[in-house]
Image (spheres, coloured by chain):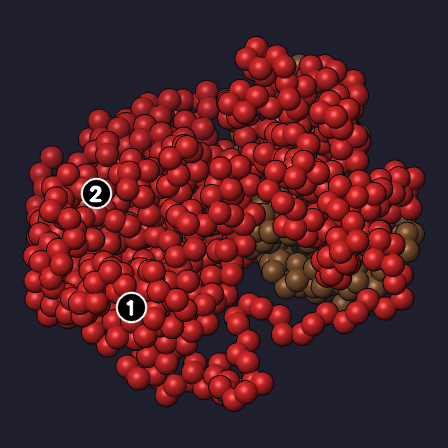
């Protein structure tokens, strides 16, 4: 059982984003700390190996289980339960499912730094978060491209654990993408993914463009990874 | 059941064995929904499963693999029992009338400790239940497959071997870079798993056959058993919503032909392969004979990511520093549980050229087994070097090597009957290399002949246990030249005798005893090491941080021819000189003197404060040393470091510092404290700690960043922090608190799913250690949540934790 795996070219992350994860709010930095942050971010990007798997499933139906709305998809045992996801995917005719990770190498390095250099661990962790978010952007771009082929339009990403979409969605979601085999993502009994720098999400595919997502290329997180843009078109038409 | 001898011949390496191809992709074509547990179809649609098996049997497969890849208790949950699934799966397979039914065991789906949360023993239990179920259901053999973690593969292999007598084949999955997701290479997998008793090792899944071929060929020289390959039919790609594999049967078989020529004897297919692929392989095998294989005659040990192999004539360095004997700081580290010093020693030895690290936790007053296991787990996270497990207690050795993800070296057995009876079976059972000391009930023989006699006794025992000779290293035991000047010659003669009289066996020596009681020991050690290498020594147990010793090793490798064309030597020694003024730069030591800090106050007190606020550790030692010239330790701490830290805390709270600044300041303060403590007289109250605090991340949670920050800050304020790490069992927390009567415990949880573990830990603390206050923190916690789980305090960040600690322990 397998779906195609993609490698993503994440060469940089926004320094501002890394700083934001670190709680930065305009404080004055010493040149030493400034250089150290740059060094650890570069080290992190050198170790990260961003990869992902995406699949698009049709919406099979909407129902209810124990008073909670449930969205069923065709060709998969994956079900999306909760009011927030129901609202997020209201009107969607298909759903893109994605899992991305920056790999076990970065996880091992975090563990090493935890024992040897806690300050570097904090910075590496923030850089890893930024990198895996970029990988998720890239995976979303793949879903956008597939939606475009089908004449559909994408909404924004939504992950298990947000709103009332339960974390217990993770086991089936990861199995549906064969993420263990293809990406090496493992799941603990507490539903924690390893590598911890991994993201799963779903994206709605709609018949009309969405005002909240991909409205302009300039502000689009998928821009750097967009095959449509590279081919001189856009996902909006 | 009628069996011919195909399997026996294949396992002896005298014949081929053809496995089946993919199950999962075949079921998907028949409409299996993505994410559905395919194993349950054995119960709900047995005919479909049998149909897949039957197609492979018709294609010529000798072996069909049960549809039980994920059939472990954790994955099946309440859907079905492991026993039900294996019973049905073996029946489905048997109904297709194959020659053999292989019970399939895949990974647990969870990540093992130390990176993940699944304990080795718990993984073992999951696999053991599968092994018993498959054995009872009547399988003919086992195939453990798609493993990415060597520790998990080891747990599965041990579980099958200890719960069934059936043959067991083990394959791992590799990426394009030639490593598993966890970094294991084909060589490491082959060495470790074949030594551990796998009946065949190999590669499955991963890549297409053309990319698998070079990887599986790398296993061939290192596996003392048949080697197998079950590649995918290329890399999957999605086309119009359908997953496709591009490598057709002819192309697949052509790549497999290359593997057969190289010596692979067990083949089949993985994802995307079909009965047509298997039929093509069947035609390929017709009329062929297994290709001859040449195994390396190497002393070989392995960590999960690194193989260290020494061919005859090559020499290896074992770092001796992780051993408390005669080392005050190492003793303190092992007693206190603060292993920073151990980790620093490990990394320094790796940098200096050690190839294996000796690990010894032998102190009378500690739980050696627990400390050894924790050390091994931590060292695995900071170094890729293979470990030498050094203990006189066989139970400690067994505990450490059983779960070690690699092939460890055991130090040691000796010629005493009791030692041979206890240690040799451990080395044999867990596939370890073994150091044998030439001493027995009569002590250490004075002569070379006497030592050789003990060595013979040891090698007779290892031969009988089936341990290959190249995995046995005899230590002829260096004795002090100062007490007996004939001793050095006797040792050198003994090394020569062992090498010539016990062919294949290697020698090892802890060198530094030779100089005991004499001045300028490094010189004697180095001279003796050179002589020992000349006598045929293979492995030297030394301090690689002593430059003189590594000089001997590096130069010997030129003279012996091991360092081909003296490449390493020229690269590293071209600039060395004994000329006056050209002092050798010791490895790992910085040449440059740090530039005087520009723009800083001249007054050392002011400068030290400024450095803490700026978070600059490097000039800190010098500044504090200057402070100590005019002030005592009490002043240095209470008037210099603590006020600076308080200011850092204030700035963090009011937002003028952010996290990395707080941590850099904490590092600088720590560097300052170290200078003060090193300078303080023993028993100086000012430099002594303010009391012990236990910190950890709770069971099930591996987020440790917050906990690490808290630890840094608490240490800064002079608390002795007992850091139990992450994913810590409540029992371990409570036991530590009880044993040391600790008055404050800090618990961290980052996920809503692990907050219950926090509540459970607090409940157990209340029950057994009611004196202990509890402070909790972590991203998901709030003051209300903290109250709900029964904590005494909620800390929103590290500085607040430090304040609470001062309140409780002050």
Instruction: Point out residue B205 in the picture as x, y percentages from the top left corner.
Output: 40, 53
- Which chain is tinted brown? A
Q: Are marks 1 and 2 in contact (CB under 8 Å)?
A: no
Is B685 above or below relative to B480?
above
Element type where label 2 sits in the image: helix
Q: Position of residue B363 (x, y in %)?
A: 39, 39
Count the marks.
Answer: 2
B326 horizontally vs B661: left or right: left
Residue B53, horizontal then vertical, whole percent: 29, 41
Label 1: which secondary element: strand
* Residue at 79 percent of width and 43 percent of height: B635
What residue appears at the point 88 percent right and 63 percent down from the top-left corner?
A: B602
Name the chain under label 1.
B
Screen quadrant of the C terminus of chain B: top right
The disc label shown at residue B459, or none? none
Residue B393 image position (x, y, % from top left): 28, 38
Mark 1 Cα shell of 10 Å, populated few (<14), some (14-19), many (≥20) = some
Say the numbered circle drawn on residue B423.
2
Say if B716 sits above or below B320 in the image.
Answer: above
- Quadrant where the N terminus of chain B sits is top left
Depicted A154 relative to depicted B601: above or below: above
Q: Looking at the image, is mark 1 or mark 2 earlier in the sequence?
A: 1
How far apart are labels 1 and 2 at the CA level? Answer: 23 Å
* Discs 1 and 2 share one subunit: yes
Which chain is rendered red in the image? Answer: B
The residue closer to the viewer here, B529 or B152, is B529
């Amino acid at each position: 059982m397998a779906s195609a795996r993609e490698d993503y070219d994440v060469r940089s992350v926004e320094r501002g984003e890394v700083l934001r994860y670190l709680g930065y709010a305009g404080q004055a930095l010493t040149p030493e700390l400034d250089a150290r942050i740059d060094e650890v971010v570069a080290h992190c990007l050198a170790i990260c190996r961003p990869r992902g798997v995406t699949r698009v499933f049709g919406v099979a139906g909407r129902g209810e289980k124990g008073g909670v709305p449930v969205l069923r998809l065709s060709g998969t045992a994956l079900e999306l339960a909760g009011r927030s996801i129901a609202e997020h995917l209201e009107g969607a005719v298909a759903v893109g499912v994605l899992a991305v990770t920056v790999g076990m190498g970065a996880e091992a390095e975090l563990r090493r730094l935890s024992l040897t250099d806690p300050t570097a661990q904090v910075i590496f962790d923030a850089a890893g978060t930024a990198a895996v978010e970029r990988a998720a952007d890239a995976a979303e771009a793949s879903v956008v491209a597939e939606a475009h082929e089908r004449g559909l339009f994408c909404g924004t990403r939504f992950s298990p654990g947000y709103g009332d979409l339960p974390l217990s969605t993770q086991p089936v979601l990861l199995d549906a993408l064969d993420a263990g085999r293809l990406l090496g993502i493992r799941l603990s009994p507490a539903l924690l993914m390893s590598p911890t720098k991994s993201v799963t999400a779903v994206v709605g595919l709609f018949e009309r463009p969405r005002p909240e997502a991909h409205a302009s290329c300039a502000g689009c997180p998928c821009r750097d990874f967009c095959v449509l843009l590279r081919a001189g078109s856009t996902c909006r038409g | 059941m009628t069996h011919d001898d195909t399997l026996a011949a294949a396992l002896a390496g005298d014949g081929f064995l053809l496995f089946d191809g993919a199950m999962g992709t075949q079921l998907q074509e028949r409409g299996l929904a993505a994410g559905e547990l395919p194993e349950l179809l054995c119960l709900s649609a047995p005919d479909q499963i049998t149909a897949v098996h039957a197609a492979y049997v018709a294609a010529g497969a000798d072996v069909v693999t049960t549809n039980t890849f994920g059939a472990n208790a954790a994955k099946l949950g309440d859907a079905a029992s492991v026993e039900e699934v294996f019973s049905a799966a073996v029946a489905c397979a048997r109904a297709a009338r194959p020659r053999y039914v292989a019970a399939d065991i895949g990974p647990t789906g969870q990540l093992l400790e130390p990176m993940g949360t699944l304990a080795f023993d718990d993984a073992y239990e999951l696999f053991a239940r599968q092994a018993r179920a498959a054995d009872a259901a009547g399988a003919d053999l086992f195939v453990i497959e798609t493993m990415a973690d060597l520790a998990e593969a080891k747990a599965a292999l041990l579980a099958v071997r200890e719960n069934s007598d059936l043959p067991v084949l083990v394959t791992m999955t590799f990426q394009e870079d030639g490593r598993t997701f966890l970094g294991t290479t084909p060589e490491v997998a082959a060495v470790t798993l074949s030594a551990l008793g796998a009946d065949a090792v190999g590669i499955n899944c991963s890549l297409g056959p053309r990319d698998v071929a070079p990887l599986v060929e790398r296993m061939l020289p290192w596996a003392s058993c048949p080697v197998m390959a079950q590649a995918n039919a290329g890399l999957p790609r999605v086309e119009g919503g359908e997953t496709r594999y591009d490598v057709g049967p002819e192309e697949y078989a052509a790549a497999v032909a290359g593997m057969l020529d190289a010596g692979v004897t067990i083949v089949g297919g993985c994802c995307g392969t079909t009965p047509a692929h298997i039929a093509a392989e069947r035609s390929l095998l017709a009329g062929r004979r297994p290709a001859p294989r040449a195994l390396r005659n190497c002393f070989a040990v392995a960590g999960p990511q690194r193989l260290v192999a020494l061919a005859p004539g090559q020499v290896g360095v074992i770092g001796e520093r992780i051993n408390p004997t005669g080392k005050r700081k190492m003793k303190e580290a092992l007693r206190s549980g603060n292993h920073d010093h151990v980790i620093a020693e490990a990394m320094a030895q790796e940098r200096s050229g050690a190839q294996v690290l000796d690990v010894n936790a032998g102190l009378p007053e500690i739980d050696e087994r627990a400390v050894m296991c924790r050390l091994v787990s931590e060292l695995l996270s900071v170094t890729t070097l293979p470990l030498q497990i050094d203990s006189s207690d066989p139970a400690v050795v067994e505990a450490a090597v059983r779960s070690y993800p690699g092939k460890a070296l055991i130090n040691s057995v000796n010629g005493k009957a009791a030692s041979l009876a206890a240690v040799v079976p451990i080395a044999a059972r867990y596939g370890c290399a073994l150091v044998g000391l030439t001493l027995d009930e009569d002590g250490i023989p004075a002569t070379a002949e006497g030592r050789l006699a003990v060595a013979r006794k040891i090698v007779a025992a290892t031969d009988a246990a089936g341990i290959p000779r190249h995995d046995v290293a005899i230590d002829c035991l260096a004795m002090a030249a100062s007490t007996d000047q004939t001793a050095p010659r006797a040792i050198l003669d003994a090394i020569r005798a062992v090498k010539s009289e016990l062919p294949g066996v290697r020698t090892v020596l802890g060198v530094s005893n030779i100089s005991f009681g004499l001045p300028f020991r490094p010189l004697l050690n180095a001279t003796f090491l050179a002589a020992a290498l000349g006598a045929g020594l293979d492995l030297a147990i030394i301090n690689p941080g002593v430059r003189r010793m590594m000089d001997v090793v590096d130069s010997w490798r030129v003279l012996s021819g091991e360092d081909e064309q003296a490449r390493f030597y020229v690269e590293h020694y071209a600039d060395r000189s004994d000329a006056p003024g050209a002092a050798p730069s010791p490895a790992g030591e910085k040449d440059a003197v740090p530039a005087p800090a520009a723009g800083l106050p001249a007054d050392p007190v002011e400068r030290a404060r400024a450095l803490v606020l700026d978070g600059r550790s490097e000039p800190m030692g010098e500044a504090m040393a200057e402070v100590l010239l005019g002030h005592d330790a009490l002043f240095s701490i209470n008037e210099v470091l603590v006020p600076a830290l308080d200011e850092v805390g204030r700035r963090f709270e009011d937002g003028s510092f952010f996290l990395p600044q707080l941590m850099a300041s904490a590092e600088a303060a720590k560097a300052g404290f170290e200078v003060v403590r090193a300078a303080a007289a023993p028993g100086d109250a000012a430099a002594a700690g303010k009391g012990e605090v236990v910190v950890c991340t709770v069971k099930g949670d591996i987020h440790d960043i917050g906990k690490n920050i808290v630890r840094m800050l608490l240490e800064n304020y002079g608390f002795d922090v007992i850091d139990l790490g992450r994913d810590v069992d409540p029992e371990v927390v409570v036991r530590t608190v009880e044993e040391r009567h600790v008055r404050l415990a800090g618990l961290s949880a980052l996920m809503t799913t692990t907050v219950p573990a926090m509540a459970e830990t607090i409940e157990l603390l209340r029950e057994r250690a009611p004196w202990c206050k509890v402070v909790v923190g972590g991203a998901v916690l709030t003051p209300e949540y903290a109250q709900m789980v029964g904590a005494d305090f909620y800390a929103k960040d590290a500085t607040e934790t430090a304040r609470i600690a001062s309140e409780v322990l002050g």
